[in-house]
Image (spheres, grey):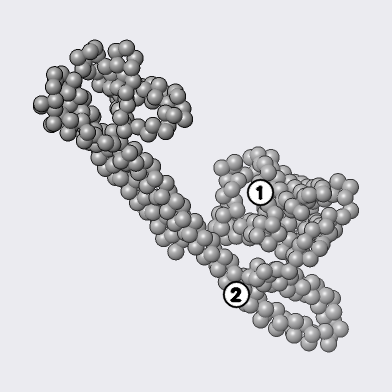
Amino acid sequence: MIKQLLSWRTFAILFGLAIVAISFYYISSITKEMEIAEKEKVKTTVEGIKYLSSLENNADANFATYVVTQNTTIPMIIVGKNGTIEFRNIDSSKIQKDSTFLSHKVAELKALKQYIVADFGYGKSTIYYGNSPMLEKLKLYPLMQMAIIVVFISIIIIAIFNAQKSLQNQVWVGMSKETAHQMGTPLSSIVGWMELLKDHEENRESIVEMEKDVMRLQLVADRFSKIGSTPILEEENVVPRLQNMVDYMQLRAPKKVSITFDSNGATEAIYLLSGPLFDWVVENLIRNALDAMEGAGTIRINLTNTTRQIVIDICDSGKGIPKTSFKKVFRPGYSTKQRGWGLGLSLAKRIISVYHNGQIFVKNSELGKGTTFRIILTR
């Protein structure tokens, strides 16, 4: 389904570009033809003016006058040999408002090489001509069309992105709820069997350890159930939560791995949290760090608490991540482990960014030296 959405997005972009290219070529051709036609019309008008200037009387002036008066759209400025200026089809109110309007217009048309030199019998004059209103609109049409198509393609891309995001959300919710449901049944059964085993004194020690594992499984099931629904956020002190997680993971880490926590003197860092989900993020990052170190190394968790932010850095001395993969590691399905599903960090990003309105990213990493993940919780 996602591949289909991506193919549709590509098709929409290519289709839009094709329309723009064809339209631009077609309109450009029409515009060029109109420019040539208008230039010929200006030449005809100039010839009419020349003919009228050469007549000693008005006996044969009817046709020439008709030709000259037919040009009602193309603006013209006639500059005589002595600097005299006449104009046609130009709004006189613009000239009244700005005395330099004609001189600026002449300079503009001269730069565009839109002028004709003609002799009306009293010295050579230069006729500068502009574009008719219709031609000006036609020149703007491709830009307007391009803007409309860009907006259209943007809407399609946003719609596809939202559909893709909605599909991913449905997958997360469905997977999480089903996992929590599937775990709930055997857990209930195990709890029942444990109650029966408590009747025998010799099982007491084993039952204590089994209860710890069952509580752990119940916590995991609870986390999955919260992923599948909107979690309830409560004011929590991040400092003891991080300390508890460090203590818990240190007991389960290899002996040659040291996990430390430094709050930089802070005893409180209050934030609206879903405690179980936040713990899951930290645990996931620590487990990834343990996998990257292969049995030996250090993991340091540093917290900085300010009035506006809580910044948490989780640093390890593992094998590191290539810079090209800094963003890829959060994509669903991306994993460097042979047996990994590539869901841990994508879930962590969802928990921090969607549920806690925060940020999680790879702050820095160096191959062979380690990686630092940063979590920012903004108040």
The front one of 5 and 314 is 5
For image coordinates 22% across by 33% down, the residue present is 69
Q: How many marks?
A: 2
The front one of 73 and 307 is 73
Q: Residue 361 has which mark?
A: 1
Residue placed under numbered mark 2 in the picture: 178
Q: Which element type, helix, strand or loop, lies under badge 2?
A: helix
Residue 193 vs residue 62: left or right? Answer: right
- Pointers 1 and 2 in contact (CB under 8 A)? no
Quarter occupied by residue 47: top left
For image coordinates 82% across by 62% down, the residue present is 236
Residue 136 vs residue 234: left or right? Answer: left
Residue 248 vs residue 115: left or right? Answer: right
Mark 2: few/some/many CA within 10 Å (<14, 14-19, 20+) = some
* Residue 29 placement (x, y as % from top left): 25, 38
Disc 1 marks a residue whose amino acid type is: Phe
Measured in 3D between alpha carbons, the distance from the residue under mark 1 to the one under mark 2, in whole angstroms, is 29 Å
Q: Which element type, helix, strand or loop, lies under badge 1?
A: strand
For image coordinates 41% across by 50% down, the residue present is 148
The C terminus: image quadrant: bottom right
